[in-house]
Amino acid sequence: MREERTGAPDPAGAADLAEFIRALERLRLWAGGPSLRTLAKRVGPLLRPPQPVSHSTVADVFKPDRRRLDQDLVLAVVRALGAGEADAARWRAACTRVHSDARAGGPVGVLRQLPADLATFTGRECELASLVRHFGRAAAVVSTIEGPAGIGKTQLALHAAHRLVRDGRCADVQLYVNLRGSDPEHPPADPAAVLGMFLRQLEVPAKHVPTGPAERAALFRERMHGKRAVVVLDDAATTAQVRELLPASPTCLVLITGQHTMTGLEGAEPHRLGAFTEEEALLLLTRVVGAGRVAAEPEAAGRILRACGYTPGAVSAVASRLRSRPAWHLADLERRLCRPSTGDHPPRVHWTVGTP
């Protein structure tokens, strides 16, 4: 983490609440390591309004497993440790930022542990072959998987990644992050925060993670060089969000999913997903529900699939509903699922289903 000329720790590089708390502990050491009782006596008069503070309350500020901090208390602690108003403003801004990231869910990432592959993964054989056949060329392979919600982008990316890992071609590192590009409840993930997470997962100590996005991206490319790796950037919002998250080594494969076309990614191979064929949709329904139930009511099965528009997410949702209700006939679901058709138009699904 970057230090100011005074030598006091700077919280600007804290990527999350845990790092922010570690920076607070370093500030305490920088200030001479006052005891918690001494610090509590200094903190009380600095609160608005002034009030007695116990040493246990101050101790809670420094616990690394905290999920939330009282900002007024934090700023009083910072001032009690000798920070001036300009420094306190930086601590206030950093405290607000890490709490905002925590409320947004933060980037969800893993190292050497991809999210689970679906046992019922169906179809997409041409797209799957295209995703893996160029791996190992002279440059890092970047493939985009594009399409509307529910079309199966994430599951295709994960299925391809798991296949490469099983084949030993991406055995060193598997990185995954949900970039929240289409999440209506949370903002898109900050690329700099994602890079910080990736670097820590690549065993870069937090204090050595650069503050600047460009420096983080450079260190990420260095750490990934020569590694047999797959990076899944799921639900990307824009090209700008993913550009700095791309390794440069030919041993790395990057799979990017998103609802929008990733224009401007030089050398990226686009894969636009559409709905399943009728055969693929029927195969998925059969795998989830069971061959016997589907074979017993083929006409109802066909009408259900047409109502789903042969979209993988919708078919998977209604199939899971059937599997959880073994006493239902397919016709029972059809009656709940569809409105009566009019003219040449097929029935329509009543409830909303959505799978990335």
Image (cartoon, rainbow, N blue to C red):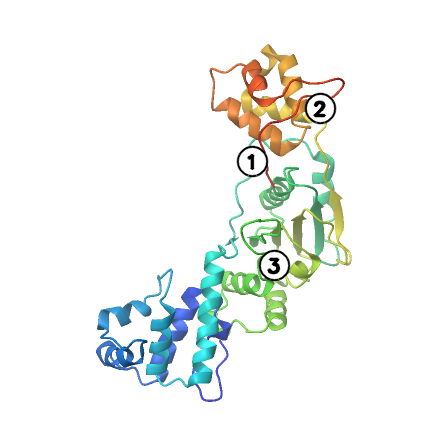
Foreground label between 1 and 2: 2
**C-alpha distance separating marks 1 and 2:** 20 Å
Specify the amino acid type for callout 3.
Lys
Residue at point 48%, 82% (across, down):
3
- In the rendered view, tell whether residue 80 sits above or below residue 204: below
Neighbours of disc 1 within 10 Å: few (<14), some (14-19), many (20+) = few
Residue tagged 1: 118
**Cβ–Cβ under 8 Å for marks 1 and 2:** no
**Image quadrant assignment for residue 66:** bottom left
Q: Which residue is mark 2?
A: 278
**Which residue lies under the disc numbered 3?**
227
Find residue 313 and report its image quarter.
top right
The front one of 30 and 115 is: 30
Q: Is residue 246 among what the camera can see?
A: no
The one of 239 and 119 positioned closer to us in this rendering: 239
Q: Is residue 297 left or right of residue 202?
A: right
The amino acid beneath tag 1 is Leu
Q: Quadrant of residue 53?
A: bottom left
Real-space CA distance between mark 1 and mark 3, rounded to the nearest whole angstrom = 26 Å
Residue 320 position in % (x across, y down): 53, 27
User: What SS does tag 2 mark?
Assistant: helix
Say what amino acid the circle numbered 2 marks: Glu
Q: Position of residue 134 (x, y in %)?
A: 74, 48
Q: Secondary structure at mark 1?
A: loop
